[in-house]
Image (cartoon, grey):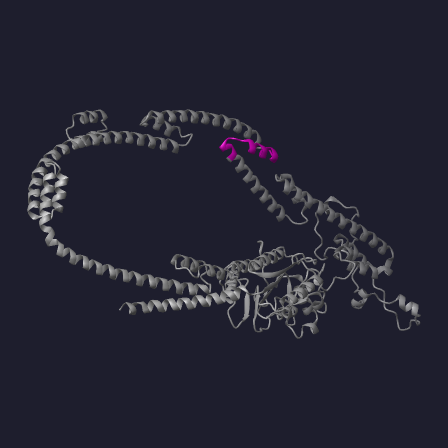
Amino acid sequence: MVQDMTRPFRFLVLLLCGLLSLAATAAGVAASERRVALVIGNSAYKSPGLEIPNARNDAQDTASALKALGFDVLLATDVDLAGASKAIQQFARMSIGADATLFYFAGHAVQYQGQNYLLPVDAEVRDEISLPFETIAVDNIRSALDRSNGVKIMVLDACRTNPVSERLARLASAAPSFSSAFDAGERTRGLQRIDKSDGLVVAFSTSPGDVALDGQDRNSPFTRAFLRRLNEPGLEIETMFRRIAADVSAATGGRQRPETYVSLVSEYYLNQDDSLAWDRIKGTDDPEVLNDFIERYPSSYYAIAARYRLEALQRAIEAARAQALREADLARREKELAAQRAQAEAAKAACERDATALQAIAPADAPALRGFVASASCGAVQAAASARLSDLEARIAADAALCQNEDNDLKALVAKGDAAAISALRADARCPATNAAAEQGLRAIAAAADAACGAANATLNGIGARDVAALRALIDKAPCAIVASAAAQRLAEGVAAIAQEAQACRRDQAAWKDLASSSDRAAIAAFRQRAACPDVIAAIDQAEDEFKTACAAEQGALAAIGANDAEATRAFLANAICDDAKTAARAKIAAIAAAAARLEDACAREDAELAGLKSQGAGARGKLIDLKGRLTCGRLRPDLEAALEQIAPQPAPSAAAPPQTPAARLLRRPRTNDLARPAPQPAPQRAAEPKPAKPARPAAVAAPARVARPVQPDRPPPAQSTAQSAPNRPDRPASPLGVGF
């Protein structure tokens, strides 16, 4: 029967040994791995707008983490194209025969025509031709990784927003032949997926076609999550990158979603610290040690073996416990049989022992009698002890009634707080318990007095320093002198403080009365800093708010005045109180005056030209028409039109006219404005109608009344000259790749 019970236990032991052997084999393989890594981080790009402050930090922190995991790390930061090429060559040599190779890049990258390129710090990508010669092709990294015999890992924290991608997009949009075969957004934004191959793991910091975020911390969101998960032992690599993707998505609110491509036929673990820990404890029989390993490495492969070993140990412990219970039950039964045999033999001896013990108990020892009655094994002796106990308990009951009366008296005195009466009762008491109760009552009275004093002190601490009424009320009802004295002292201090504050308020109110109507904002601000009266401070703040509101209203009123309304602007300036509004009004008046001066200058020039043309007679009609087309001074228009009416159009040449020479034909060539006009009609004969009087020509000198006169509605204001309106442009043409690149 014992042999059958041990068979399950032997099976569990054999199973546990097998699991331990398998775990030891896996640990030995992990310990013998040769791991190499190339880590590049480019921050200090030479082209404007490409700097990435945290890319160098990303590379340095990643290199440190990989070294801690047993990688032989080649670190390169802020490398140019030549330095990157040398690092890749060295990495390719290191990868020969390696069990695991890893490449990490933090910086800028672009993709073009389905190929991915990493940017060194000296990259000068001017167009699609220079792209493969100025950058690092990801295919070269693939070639270096392929020299490894084991797992190949590529981590790209790139695809960040950069002017190179935008430049390629602009070039693609500008050149139809360049953009006909490929969409511009797919060529330049983000990175292209990499073709899978056996043993390759590729991790992108963001999904293809999107850009990665740099963040404001020491590391980018992707690298921060990557470093966190690298420090978590026992994570299978595909599970690790899935958790990294979830961390990045949560940290960026879903704006960045990393992607990973895994082509492995077996599981792989970057952080194998759990194997070292398992080597130290795999032979333990302590369940607490195994539980601690499972809690520290829940994702570890060895956690499975630890759970199996823990379950086996627990089953073995339960089996041993059950066996011990069975053996204890068997021993108990044997003991009961022996007791039954000895019971009969011991009965007689027990009665003799009980009789002897009863005789040894003192007559007034009730507890001993009760204990004897409860423990006596002989019935006759037990009955005699019970009778003796009954007589003793009657006497004890009488004494208890006396003690109860004294106790009731004591409680009444304690409730009254009469310490003197309690002391007298204690002196006359006949019950032994009364003395102790009286002493306790005296301590309770003293404690109540202390508690009342403490409560009064707490009330005092809660009263404000200037709450004079509350302090006086506390002094009147304070239960102890020390609290009353402290309250009186605080009352005196509060009264003095109130008087001092009242004096300060009178002083500040007098000063504020003098400053309230002042426009000296600096003096008001200085007075606000040194004022001590709360009411005066509130009045100053209110006055300042009203002044700011008035300033805002004046700014709005000034903006509502017409652009050329000088008189309204002057009226506004006369009533303005805000310095900023006054400054803006003065600038507006100056601008209106300058515009009026320019208009008067134009009127003077055009008036002189009109006077000269009028003096030339009928031969200047064409020039008068040309002047009418470009006239900017509205007040000269009536005079110009009157001059045109007085000069009749010249008749067309008759058929009998002599032939004209080429020079004469050139002199008679009509002007553009004349060609657009219809043929002149003979004026109808009118009755002796008086000719309208010629209007007086306005003076060329600017008059104040003309400053505010608006421009005539039938002609727009003179256009600015080309030299004035054209923006400043650089002497050389802008680069098609963008300004400053």
Quadrant of residue 326 within the rendered picture? bottom left
**How far across and down, in percent of the image, does residue 214 sit?**
59, 58
Magenta segment range? 518-537
Tell me if residue 482 can be seen. yes
Residue 531 located within the stretch drawn in magenta:
yes
* 518 sits left or right of 288 in the view: right
* 344 sits left or right of 414 in the view: left
Q: Quadrant of the C terminus?
A: bottom right
Number of on-image labels: 0
**How far across and down, in percent of the image, does residue 4 sit?**
29, 70
- Nearest the eye: 609 or 41: 41
**How far across and down, in percent of the image, does residue 40 sit?**
63, 61
Tell me if residue 257 can be seen. no
Q: Quadrant of the N terminus?
A: bottom left
| Residue with the most extreme bottom position | 181
Note whether 253 is above or below 137 in the view shown. Answer: above
- Nearest the eye: 182 or 267: 267
**How far across and down, in percent of the image, does residue 6 sit?**
31, 67
- Nearest the eye: 510 or 473: 473
Specify the principal SS of the magenta part: helix
- Nearest the eye: 521 or 107: 107
Residue shown at 91%/67% (left/top)?
A: 664
Residue 80 located within the stretch drawn in magenta:
no
Quadrant of residue 660 within the rendered picture? bottom right
* 708 sits left or right of 70 in the view: right
